[in-house]
Image (cartoon, rainbow, N blue to C red):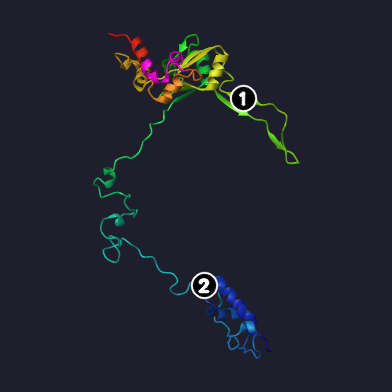
Amino acid sequence: MTFNLAARVVPRCLRAASQLHRSPSCLLANHAALARPSTVFRPSTPPPSSAKGFASVVVQRPKEFIHSGNVRDNNGARRKRKILGRGEGGKGKTSGRGQKGYKARQHKSRPTPGFEGGQSGIIKAIPHMGLRGLDKPRFTRLYLDTLQHFIDSGKLDASKKITIADLVQAKAVGKIKDGIVLLGKVRDISPPVLRTGNGTFRTDGSDLSMFRQGGEFFDKKVDIEVTRVTQPAVQLIEKLGGTVTSVYHGKVALKAILRPDKWAIMPVNPMPTRSADLARYTDEAHRGYLAQEAEGIDKRQLVKTLLQKSRARVPVA
């Protein structure tokens, strides 16, 4: 009985070798057992052109079969991990890192660029270049719904003028850094836009509606004084007949307002000197407390005139 054994066995050997990551020659003998011949065969006909080089291979019956118990890596494919830090020699003690230094530490990091071992680096000797902007003021937010809640609960009296000291005493606001800003949150809800089949757009016919968040429950006539106020809050308060004023507070004067028990003589609130603060507190749109005094005054002489007016109001001891 003769048949082309190489054409049947060799592809199986190559496929098994690719699956087990082993060389084809080490698996050729084991996979020849799949044909289960009882004697040694020598092919009498030459193999096809795709199996050249295997015509003279003698296939013998294997002595053992491949199974999960004898599959292993080739010799030298895996090396045993070196255990460090055990004993004196053989990468013990310092584990091959040497003594001290950045490379001997566990994190193996490098010093920060510019670090010179603890001495004052060259960066310290270079002055700052350019202008550094001032810190942005941080204001504590007060919403109209919160103001309405404290008025309804009796902690704030709407018949009197409400100041920052009253808001702090009633605990309507938290920690104050640079002042209080009064907000009436307003959100515009636009009608949904639908796309038609011809590429044009249309609305569903609903009108634009304004949903006031924080202002829908506000219904009290109040006279309040804060550091800043938004336009929606101004409109809601004045619609009910109330008034709102934005007043500038210096850092020392604000501390004295928050803790008057620590001051034997209350400091005088200074005038704003920054151009942005002057533009805000002399503007009627922002309800600035200097808007009436700044009417008819030249902008170049505005600060000088306002300072003279403020000094005239301060009583002389």
Task: Report if residue 36 is visible in the image.
Answer: no
**Disc 1 residue type?**
Phe
* Residue highlighted by disc 2: 71
Q: Residue at x 38, y 33 (%)?
A: 133
Determine which quarter of the picture holds residue 136: top left
Q: Position of residue 257 (x, y in %)?
A: 37, 17
Task: Report if residue 10 is visible in the image.
Answer: yes
Whether 237 is drawn above or below 92: the answer is above
Q: Name the element at disc 1.
A: strand
Considering every residue shown, the one lying at the far right of the view is 197
Q: Name the element at disc 2.
A: loop
Seen from the viewer's position, the closer of residues 142 and 26 is: 142
Q: Nearer the observer, disc 2 or disc 1? A: 1
Please tell me which of labels 2 and 1 falls first in the chain: 2
Q: Is residue 24 one of those drawn in magenta?
A: no
Q: Is residue 291 one of those drawn in magenta?
A: yes
Label 2 to label 1: alpha-carbon separation: 74 Å
Q: Position of residue 132 (x, y in %)?
A: 36, 35
* Residue highlighted by disc 1: 211
Seen from the viewer's position, the closer of residues 174 and 138 is: 138
Which residues, given as a range, are shown in magenta?
288-306
Q: Residue at x 36, y 22 (%)?
A: 251
Quadrant including the C terminus: top left
